[in-house]
Amino acid sequence: GPLEEMSLPLFFGWFLLSSVQDKVRCTSMDFLKTLDTLEAFKKHLSDFTGKAEKEVDLEQYFQAKGTLHCTTKFCDYGKAPGAKPYAQNTAVKELYGSAFELSLSALFVTPRTVGARVSLTEEQLLLWPADPEEEAGSTSLPRGSRAHITLGCAEHVEPVQTGLDLLEILTLQQEGQQGEPIEEMELGSLTYYGEGRWLLTLREPICTPACFSSFYG
Ligand code: A2P
């Protein structure tokens, strides 16, 4: 019945403390503000607008949704494959409600999403489900590659896209595509991977406290 379906959450994940959410949002906004003034970005503007001559305000282009978090397992109230075994996993039960320190190692922007890459520790990988990379068709990337925080989505784009965009960039890197080095920014080095895919590798990872919990919605 409906009550039984409600016993599993929409998703499990690490939820950033509200004070650091603001900091991460500001960092992301600053990055977007700088990115859309760069000549290199303007050169590839048609990736975002479809028309070379139009301008784009990236801060308006992406909409932020909900509280910042890094999804571990999307359960869809139990309907998603593997939801129940994940929820019953020993590490998930024991670490539920605990505090963690997440390391954000890069920011990325595509015409669909903006997000932060999360580099998981061994302990954090205990909470990572078996197959989110394979589900997305990326069979050869290391476990945890998909870990990210969605910072914003373009109109009509669902947040699930952010992890797929990240995997796409990591797959290009793994295939040996270096990308086009653009410039050293205050936050780190900016690389362009074609088709509107931008990656800012942070010089200093952003460390942020986060609570492992779940969201029912
Ligand atoms: P993400 O983790 O990239 O932010 P929604 O609001 O669309 O129901 O999604 C709720 C959360 O679950 C979002 O954080 C979203 O993406 C994530 N999510 C949605 N669908 C999936 C999916 N099929 N696989 C993995 N994560 C998902």
Image (cartoon, grey):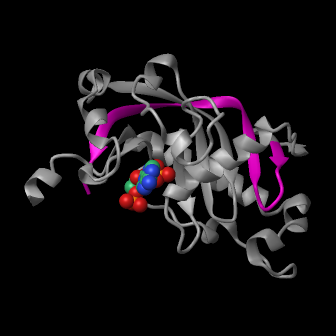
Residue found at x 68% / y 66%: 58
Quarter of the image holding residue 123? top left
Residue 165 placed where, x, y %?
64, 53
Image quarter of the N terminus? bottom left
Residue 66 visible within the image:
no
Residue 150 placed where, x, y %?
52, 51
Most foreground residue, 193 or 187:
193
Most foreground residue, 156 or 1:
1
Q: Quadrant of ligand 1?
A: bottom left
The tally of labels here is: 0
Image quarter of the C terminus? bottom left
Residue 7 located left or right of residue 127:
left
Quarter of the image holding residue 76? bottom left
Residue found at x 29% / y 23%: 95
Residue 77 placed where, x, y %?
25, 52
> In the figure, 110 relative to 213: above or below?
below
> In the figure, 122 relative to 150: above or below?
above
Q: Main secondary structure of the magenta part?
A: strand
The magenta-colored residue range is: 190-217
Residue 143 located left or right of residue 195:
left
Residue 200 located left or right of residue 215:
right
Residue found at x 55% / y 29%: 143
Asked whether residue 176 is drawn in magenta, I would say no
Most foreground residue, 200 or 72:
72
